[in-house]
Image (tube, helix red, strand yellow):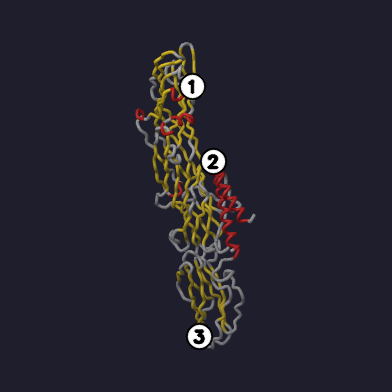
Amino acid sequence: MRAHTFLRTAFRSTMMMVAATGVTFAASQAHADTAGAVGGTNSSTGSAALKFDMAQGLDTPIDTGYLGPAAVQVRAVVRIDPVKDGGPLYSIDMPKGAVVEATWAGDKKITLKAANGSQTDGTIKVRHTLTPSLQVKVSAFGLTANFAFDAAKLVNKLPGARFAYDSKATQQFAPWGFTKADAKLSSPDLANSVLFSESFSNLAQIVTGDALDPAQWAGEIGIRAVTKPVFSYMTKKVMLSGSDTAITTGAGESVIDATDGDFMEVMAQVEGEMNISGTMDIQPFVSTSMVFGHSLSISTGINAVSKPYVVAPSKVAFQASVVHIPLPNVHAPKEGVDLGDVKAGGSGSKTVTIENTGEMAATMSFKSSDPAFQVPGGSVTVAPKSKYDLQIKFSSQSAGAAQSDITVLSNDADSPEQMFKIGANGADVGGSSEGSKDGLPGSAPSADSGCGCKTAGTTTSTGGWAGIGLLGLGLAVAARRRRNSNA
């Protein structure tokens, strides 16, 4: 099996394993924002789309215990579940708000921050129903019977195969979600919130416990319930590949080695936590017209029970996403430059091409170690994927050999200072110059494949399904780089 085929198969298998858990992830997207938007030429930004869907329901500690008169009692246990065919229980979506700021200061290090910004394009969407399991206990004529109506079976006996309760809400939040975001749901009045009401005869086939023989039993069972839960989300940790320092607040940052490339890619692994709490009002009811084959008309007049609840916190692990960050990539000449012979008192000039192969504009300035070799003052800005013709003028004081070190200062993150030699009248300008980049002009070293990719470092700790997502993306990036190298 070819290596790239194996990697593709492994990635597909990983994603199938994630889907099997009941927690689904949206396909992640990444794009580059306008370079330098952070506020200077030594900065760049990139962003990733993050989305998490919770497809499973949540158990609550709600248990009413048996309620009602001794002759007929009813007990309810209630879950919070997704509405059937109504999408996930909740979604946390950051379509473009997961912004990574990259800054550098000439020390060949890049500082990465999870930018908060002022926009609020993160969204929490919640849609839920209440799913009850009911138990009925009847004590009459010296006999006792117990019936249990399990929610998983009960729901399939109801019109439309779902419970009537349907509540939803949407809440926006700041990028990354380091500040807690609360989605507060509303509810109807309890009197107008019958989850279901069905006769015993329609439920005879799903009861557990004692037999519910329609010839022996007749009546109706139902439940009313409402709740106004608060779904509270907060991001707890952001890991960026290349650094073993987790970002846990909006002010946090990670520092990585600068890469020699036209752009940089980092993987963002984001973990958060969802907390749910509220108060539930419950009013189960049951009425009978026949029990144990005898006519017995009883209707339980049960008062509503109000129960507070707190659902155990659930971990939110987003799929690892690739963040693409543009960089300037300046290439000074890698060989010395010979200006030729210049007579004493004469002058000459040479045009030297400086290239910016990066995806971000480069800012350059120049210095000469010998004032006889003059370079332009001030600074110039070279657009992405462009070249600058540097004109060097030489004023000869004698016919003897002369040479100078030309220094190119720029906002290139990994090579802020590059140098090449220029000479005249037979001066030895040597071979490759100190500080200039290797490889062909305009190309990054072959070890980087010219892409500046940064994959997950060995010191990055991953866990749970987020770790699997990071592994899958790592395999995908590895496969892409292998294809590029074989092209």
> Marks 2/3: CA distance?
76 Å
Q: Amino acid at mark 2?
A: Thr
Q: Position of residue 111 (x, y in %)?
A: 51, 57
Identify the residue shown where x is 58% and y is 59%: 481
SS state under label 2: loop
The residue wearing badge 1 is: 147
- 317 over 242 or under it: above or below: above
Identify the mark nearer the N-term, 2 or 1. Answer: 2
Q: Of the residues tagged 1 and 3, which is closer to the observer?
A: 1
Q: Position of residue 162 (x, y in %)?
A: 43, 33
How many numbered badges does the structure rendering display? 3
The residue wearing badge 3 is: 347
> Marks 1/3: CA distance?
106 Å
Identify the mark nearer the N-term, 1 or 3. Answer: 1
Residue sitting nearer the eye, 156 or 480: 156
**Numbered circle sitting on residue 231:** none
Mark 2 crowdedness (10 Å alpha carbons): few <14, some 14-19, many ≥20: few
- 225 over 481 or under it: above or below: above
Q: Position of residue 260 (x, y in %)?
A: 55, 63
Q: Is residue 185 left or right of residue 412?
A: left
**Numbered circle sitting on residue 21:** 2
Q: Quadrant of residue 277?
A: top left
Residue sitting nearer the eye, 452 or 242: 452
Mark 1 crowdedness (10 Å alpha carbons): few <14, some 14-19, many ≥20: some
SS state under label 3: strand
Point out the image quarter for the C terminus: bottom right
Q: Furthest-right residue in view? A: 1
Q: Amino acid at mark 3?
A: Ser
Point out the image quarter for the N terminus: bottom right
